[in-house]
Amino acid sequence: MREQVLSWLAENVSEHRLQHILGVEQMSIDLAKHHHLDYHKAGQAGLMHDLAKFFKPSRLLEMAKANHIEIDPVCAENPHLLHADVSAIVAQNEFGVTDEEILTAISNHTLGRPGMSELSCVVFVADALEPSRGNSIELETLRQQSKENLYKSVYQTCDYSLKYLLNSYLTIHPRTVLTRNWALQIVKQRS
């Protein structure tokens, strides 16, 4: 199936995006192995996480509505945020993916979700931290943390994203904040 997905991606995303996707696939596999999770599922979710990244806003909204995905005011204003949920639909419809854990990891990769599985955490973190995102000291520290404590990595990744959104004067989806607080609470309970 991987070759089929790669062929589809070559037709539907930019070369730069494809390199990011391959980075997320590899980092998802590596993190899953490191945290003793199913690395086949992690790789599949990583490979398919951005299937709908280049869909036009109207198509994202149309597919979300047709598949009963909640379109809150933030997503209505910023339809690109729906690409994660729509990518899961494409994975199911185009490639026959039926594994709920994989589909949910694809859906959760952008905003996260309180209570998400460890597999979803892996893909969420890999999407933000894979190597083509840059090599700053902060990113390198976050990558190292992702191997040490998955939940700490989730909330720190949220913090990193929130800083970027604040500094760029971009809209923040409440789910990112809820995901951060959920992961932070887990870390506090365990320490």
Image (cartoon, rainbow, N blue to C red):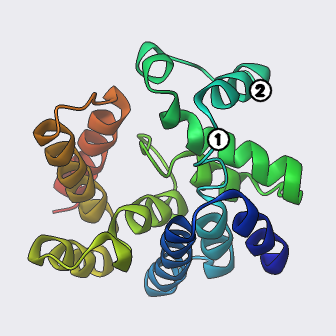
Image quadrant holding the C terminus, namely bottom left
Q: Position of residue 105 (x, y in %)?
A: 58, 55
Residue visible at 87% across and 47% down? 93
Task: Give the quarter of the figure containing the N terminus.
Answer: bottom right
**N-term mark: 2 or 1:** 1
Local crowd size for mark 2, using a 10 Å CA cut-off: few (<14), some (14–19), many (≥20): few
Residue extending farthest to the top is 73
Tell me the amino acid under the disc marked 2: Asn
146 up-or-down from 190: above or below: below
Residue 30 pos. (x, y %): 48, 85
Residue at left 31%, top 81%?
147
Reply above or below: 64 against 52: above
In the rendered view, does 182 fall on the left or right side of 67? left
Per the rendering, the mark at residue 71 is: none
**Closest to the observer: 54 or 64?**
54
Tell me the CA gap for discs 2 and 1: 16 Å
* Kind of residue indicated by mark 1: Phe
Residue 36 versus residue 32: which sits nearer the camera? 32
Q: Which is closer to the viewer, label 2 or label 1?
A: 1
Q: Which residue sits at x=14%, y=37%?
A: 166
Which residue is identified by label 1?
55
Q: Is residue 88 above or below residue 136?
A: above
Residue 162, image quadrant: top left
Horizontal relation, residue 152 to residue 27: left or right: left
Query: Residue shown at 62%/34% (left/top)?
Result: 56
For disc 2, the marked residue is 67
Q: Label 1 crowding class (10 Å Cα cut-off): few <14, some 14-19, many 20+?
A: some
Say which quarter of the image contains residue 58: top right
At which x and y percent is residue 145? 22, 75
Q: Element at badge 2? A: loop
Q: How many marks?
A: 2
Give residue 187's quadrant in the image.
bottom left
